[in-house]
Image (spheres, rainbow, N blue to C red):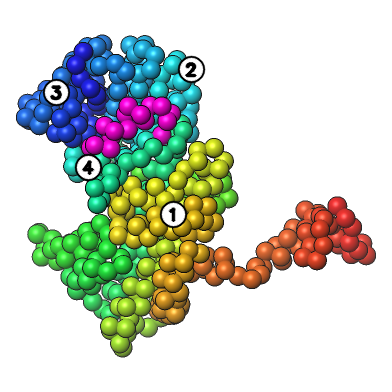
């Protein structure tokens, strides 16, 4: 036995992770259900470092130093369970199984329980950054036992992305915490992409600008507060020309957004926890609307375009308004995502350090951005910060753009441009800062039709009003 780490599942992600380990000087045991992928890795990338290929799972396990560290990188779901079932009888107490696929966190909790009973460590690990990240340095979010991180952590930190020399990998928390945080990361990614898409649409409709012109605006934005991977690639995508037609690439792409399910999981969990992650929810539903083909056909045919042509007069002022509205909406979406992490952490006893999550998302992953530094700093100022928006930096930054944000959302409404994520983020902002909400009326209605009781502003207790009789109040 001489391999320090093993990877089973050698499709694009597993292959690139294995190469990344090898390039960092580790001897890597490699295995795949069908041997062809293992052979092709050795044939094409064997020069990357020291690989120990095995055709059978038995040989693969036997080639690993103890405690064994096995990274499972197969299709999430039944395939992961199948591999675990095959692997577990071959392992010994103290060995570590790392699930680096996109598992849903309740599955990770279940698997961790089952393996813990057998004396094994199960480390559900979020890995972000796609194929490119897997090869050159992803953002890594490992859960499981703190004990497993002692031997596994340094290896994962080694192959992770680095920002200012700091690894984009840290221990997240017990059992499902790592996969949970990866799920929220993806939810935030949905929100960020939707906000960028709305900004693009506003610039297109308001200015009548071409995709290439808007691409240049995004490139300019990428030099300021908005600097991020998503803004950078948006600039590139918008300036890309379709080779076949000579049109802007974005103009020949069908406008129906697909999804693999992590946004939906995030929204479902937000509903379970009662955390208003409106940005992520709007983004997920906006994708659903785009794919609602019969509804869109019926809507286009029956609903009149009542708004005239939008002609913005002061081009530069409008571009700056959109930029400020985008930044403010983005802060809201992230603030909500971090609230969700805090709520799940409390519910599951995970003790997740939110500032550390922002830190490991600064590199390697899809939402990597300059502004994540500001989030880390906010949680360093106050680890228990109840609302990211209330941190002094963000109050200032959002406050600066508030008037612009209101102008943009109202102009979008007047001109018939859909901005679900911009608008709901602004409503969230106004809701969370409101002195008094109309929830009082909801409570009164609930008491009226269902005797659901209410609390009062002027004294303690729970009350019910006899609505159908003399409408007197009683203490419930
Ligand atoms: P896939 O998700 O396409 O899975 C293919 C791999 O699963 C192959 O190695 C295949 O073996 C293996 N496999 C299957 Br399918 N069923 C199996 C079974 N019953 N027993 C054993 N092996 C089985 O690969 P991928 O695109 O590289 O993704 C791997 C994981 O990484 C997934 O969980 C995915 O969600 C996640 N992912 C993450 C990112 C990211 O950015 N973080 C990007 C893409 C994917 P075979 O070769 O014998 O068929």
Q: Main secondary structure of the magenta part?
A: helix
Residue 450 at x, y percent in the picture: 78, 54
Residue at far bottom of view: 313
The verdict on residue 408 being magenta is no
Q: CA distance from mark 4 to mark 2?
A: 33 Å
Residue 186 at x, y percent in the picture: 37, 48
Is 152 displayed left or right of 211 in the figure? right
Residue 314 visible here? yes
- For label 1, the residue is 380
Q: CA distance from mark 1 to mark 2?
A: 37 Å
Q: CA distance from mark 4 to mark 3?
A: 19 Å
- For label 2, the residue is 117
User: 227 above or below 44?
Assistant: below
Q: Earlier in the sequence, mark 4 or mark 2?
A: 2
Residue 452 at x, y percent in the picture: 77, 53
Query: Quadrant of the rendered structure where residue 8 is?
Result: top left
Q: Earlier in the sequence, mark 3 or mark 1?
A: 3
> Is disc 4's CB within 8 Å of ligand 1?
no
Residue 287 visible here? no
- Graded by Cα atoms within 10 Å as few (under 14), some (14 to 19) or many (20 or more), the crowding at tag 3 reads many
Q: Nearer the viewer, mark 1 or mark 2?
A: 1
**Front in this rendered view, residue 429 or 287:** 429
Report the disc number at residue 137: 4
Q: Secondary structure at mark 1?
A: helix
Q: Which residues are magenta?
A: 143-159
- Which residue appears at 15% of the width and 62% of the height? 240
Is 421 displayed left or right of 472 in the figure? left
Q: CA distance from mark 1 to mark 4?
A: 25 Å
Q: Secondary structure at mark 2?
A: helix
Q: CA distance from mark 3 to mark 1?
A: 41 Å
- For label 3, the residue is 51
- Graded by Cα atoms within 10 Å as few (under 14), some (14 to 19) or many (20 or more), the crowding at tag 2 reads few
């Amino acid at each position: 036995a001489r391999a320090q780490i093993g990877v089973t599942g050698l499709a694009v992600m597993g292959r690139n992770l294995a190469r990344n380990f090898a390039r960092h000087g580790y001897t890597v045991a490699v295995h795949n259900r069908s041997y062809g992928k293992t052979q092709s890795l050795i044939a094409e990338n064997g020069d990357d470092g020291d690989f120990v290929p095995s055709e059978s799972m038995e040989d693969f396990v036997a080639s690993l130093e103890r405690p064994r560290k096995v990274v499972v990188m197969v299709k999430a779901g039944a395939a992961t369970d199948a591999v675990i079932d095959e692997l577990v009888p071959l392992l010994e107490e103290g060995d570590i199984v790392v699930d680096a696929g996109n598992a849903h966190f309740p599955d990770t909790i279940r698997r961790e329980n089952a393996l813990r009973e057998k004396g094994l460590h199960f480390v559900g690990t979020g890995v972000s950054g796609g194929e490119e990240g897997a090869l050159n340095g992803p953002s890594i979010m490992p859960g499981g036992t703190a004990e497993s991180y002692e031997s596994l952590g340094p290896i994962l930190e080694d192959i992770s992305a680095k920002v200012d020399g700091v690894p984009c990998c840290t221990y997240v928390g017990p059992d499902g915490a790592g996969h949970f945080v990866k799920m929220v990361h993806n939810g935030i990614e949905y929100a960020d992409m939707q906000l960028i898409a709305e900004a693009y649409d506003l610039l297109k409709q308001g200015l009548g600008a071409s995709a290439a012109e808007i691409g240049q605006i995004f490139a300019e934005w990428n030099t300021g507060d908005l600097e991020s991977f998503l803004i950078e690639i948006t600039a590139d995508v918008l300036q890309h020309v379709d080779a076949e037609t000579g049109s802007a690439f974005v103009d020949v792409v069908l406008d129906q957004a697909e999804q693999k399910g992590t946004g939906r999981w995030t929204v479902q969990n937000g509903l379970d926890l009662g955390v208003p992650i409106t940005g992520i929810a709007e983004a997920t539903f906006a994708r659903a609307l785009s794919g609602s083909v019969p509804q869109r056909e019926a809507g286009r045919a029956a609903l009149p375009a009542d708004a005239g042509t939008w002609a913005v007069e002061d081009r530069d002022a409008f571009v700056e308004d959109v930029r400020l509205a985008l930044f403010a909406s983005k802060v809201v979406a992230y603030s909500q995502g971090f609230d969700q992490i805090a709520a799940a952490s409390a519910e599951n006893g995970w003790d997740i350090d939110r500032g550390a999550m922002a830190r490991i998302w600064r590199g390697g992953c899809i939402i990597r951005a300059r502004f994540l530094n500001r989030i880390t700093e906010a949680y360093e100022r106050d680890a228990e910060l109840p609302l990211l928006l209330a941190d002094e930096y963000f109050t200032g930054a959002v406050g600066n753009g508030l008037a612009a944000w209101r102008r943009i959302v109202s102009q979008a409404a007047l001109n018939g441009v859909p901005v679900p994520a911009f608008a709901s983020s602004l409503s969230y902002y106004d809701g969370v800062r409101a002195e008094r909400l109309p929830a009082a009326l909801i409570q009164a209605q609930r008491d009226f039709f269902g005797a659901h009781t209410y609390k009062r502003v002027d004294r303690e207790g729970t009350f019910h009003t006899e609505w159908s009789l003399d409408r007197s109040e009683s203490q419930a």
